[in-house]
Image (spheres, rainbow, N blue to C red):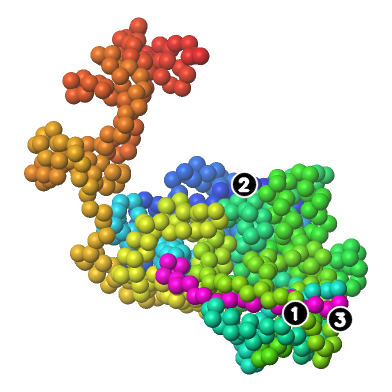
Amino acid sequence: MKLVIIESPFKREALKKYLGSGYEVFATKGHIRDIPQKSFGIDIKNNFEPKYEIVPDKKELIRELKSKAEKAEEVLIATDPDREGEAISWHVANILGFDTEKSCRIEFNEISKKAVSKALENPRKIDLKLVDAQQARRVLDRLVGYKVSPILCKKIAPKLSAGRVQSVALKLVVEREIEIENFVPEEYWTVNAILKKDASQIKAALATYNKKKFVPKNKEEVDKMLEEIKGKDFLVKEVKKTKTKSHAPAPFTTSTMQQDALNKLGMSLARTSSSAQQLYEGVDIKGEGKIALITYIRTDSVRVSTDAQNACREYIKNKFGENFVPSKPNIYHTKDSAQDAHEAIRPITMDITPEIAKETLSNDNYRLYKLIYERFLASQMSEAEYASVTVNFDCEKYGFKVSGKTMEFPGYTSVYKEFVEDENKEGMAGKLPKLDEGEMLPCEKILPEQKFTKPPTRYTEASLVKAMEEKGIGRPATYAATITILQTRKYTVKEAKYLIPTELGRKITAYLDQFFSGVINVKFTAYMEGRLDDIAVRDEDWHSVVASFWNGFEHLLERADASSVTMKEPPKETDIICELCGSKMLIRSGKYGEFLACSNFPKCKNTKPIENPKKIIGKCPECGADMVERKSKKGKIYYSCTRYPDCKFMSWDITTGEKCPKCKSPLIKKGKIVKCSNNTCDYKENVIE
């Protein structure tokens, strides 16, 4: 029996279908060895070596893995086909004691018979360059996160975090908000002339004055124009007829899929990522069982295999006709900064159409699969063709313009239309009546409209992903997680579909700009992404890349830590009197949230939880008074008597006010059960209705 090791257990069923009976599939369920979660884990003095340890909850899994590997005639590691997957393969091989020269690594971009069979025929060594690039990324992220976060907690507020990519994404959102706030609207006017041609009306937009582009800035300029053209006919100065074509868009990358899913389907990044993962790992399809529907979903490449290209072209020919198939396959070029590790996101087979899959897919999975399927289908279709007409009119010194566009051949638009934020443009019309140069048209009316320039639009999740990709911040696998954590930590909030920085998010960005602008900025972060690529592609030593970063970063840390600059909220004075010394209590922030502390500190060190309006829960078993919910300094909920300090009874559970008939300990409520609080006593009462 041969053993194939994968990451996700959800792939197992779809993969076993193609492996056959001679293989056993074992899932690591993600990382099994990593840098410790609760400690720094980087030995800076020893060339930045990470201190890897077994993930705590994977010890039993590893024992099982070792046992199966010892019994297997061959072990193949088939983790995901990206740098993180390569690193996981390396960790697995290390734990199993494999030699670095052992050809134990297989990879496939899709879970299909052909891809899996090809992978099995071509095992290779683990690519240590990819592993090193991933190690460098993990070390860099740990250096920034673990070194900057404590400073933020010290200088701003407890429980804050910074991140090499996260903080730059936050900076983009904050800077956009500041740009919006500082925006000064400027007045301008649009002017449309309604011209008459037989039974048709033509709406032409003001374009020029004295043959130069002209946009009136105020009512005075508009009134002057109206006076000059009042009652005048319009001359058809020029009629331009052209044929235009629109080329099909490339198949999806991770970021373009995320953008389209949000813009067209209203699916958040989290929903899109979850759905895409399921479509890649395998879903139930009627008559097929559990199969994978799409290729690997973390990619920045628009490349597709020749086989997939040919299959798509054949499908188009059969369904739409030969006119919809271009003479040569459409080839798309991946941008230079992309890793281009594997193909674009596409359906594995054209035979399973969205309509076939719809019956057994969830709503999100169906809609996303349909989007991916149609985008790939469109990417190999012919161009859309249009007949365009542009007419220029003259009236005195003013030029007006109208353009019309009619489709002559739909091409790829038969299955897919690109998302456009605002299609309403001045001077655009549908089909125009026949117009000849030199003819004069009467003007029925002039429609001037005052407008004001608008500030830039806030980021949506989709447009922030697009900005991160264009600026070279992060990688496909990180976009969704980065943007999600900004909202989870309340550095940004989402109103409608837009991301808005919170006051805390703005404060963090301001502080990082003051002390870490040399590291936490768009340009440097993109540069570091390039340096990580150099490790993978140009065989750069990862230790040197990290060391060059640390040499400058260390000084920034020292300067920030030593500075007296603080952005902490000053403590808030209350009317509550300290029962120990009579001074007023202050509201302060700590690791576990806000609490009360004596203003006479350090002479008086009295602290206590903030007493919110008390919610009466249960009765005190000692004196019969009400019990109320309170919160400890560490944020834990407990219950205490309202007669405190005269009665000091407290409980971590809700009490009934009665005592156990067996041992006289307080009775407590656990859901709908009343039981004795003494764990050695077995007394229970019936379920409370």
- What distance separates the C-alpha of mark 1 from that of mark 3? 17 Å
Question: Decide: marks 1, 2 in contact (CB < 8 A)?
Answer: no
Residue that appears at 50% across and 69% down: 455
Q: Where is residue 400 in the image (x, y as percent from the top left)?
A: 70, 84
Q: Which residue lies furthest to the top in this view?
A: 661
What amino acid is found at the position of numbered circle 1 in the picture? Cys
Q: Where is residue 422 in the image (x, y as percent from the top left)?
A: 65, 67
Graded by Cα atoms within 10 Å as few (under 14), some (14 to 19) or many (20 or more), the crowding at tag 3 reads: few
Residue under pointer 1? 443
Graded by Cα atoms within 10 Å as few (under 14), some (14 to 19) or many (20 or more), the crowding at tag 1 reads: many
Residue under pointer 2? 9
Tell me: 551 left or right of 286: left
At mark 3, the secondary structure is loop
Residue under pointer 3? 434
At mark 2, the secondary structure is helix
Q: In which quarter of the image is residue 303?
A: bottom right
Tell me: 395 left or right of 187: right
Q: Nearer the viewer, mark 2 or mark 3?
A: 3
Q: Which of 168 and 263 is in front in this view?
A: 263
Tell me: 293 left or right of 57: right
What amino acid is found at the position of numbered circle 2 in the picture? Pro
150 drawn magenta:
no
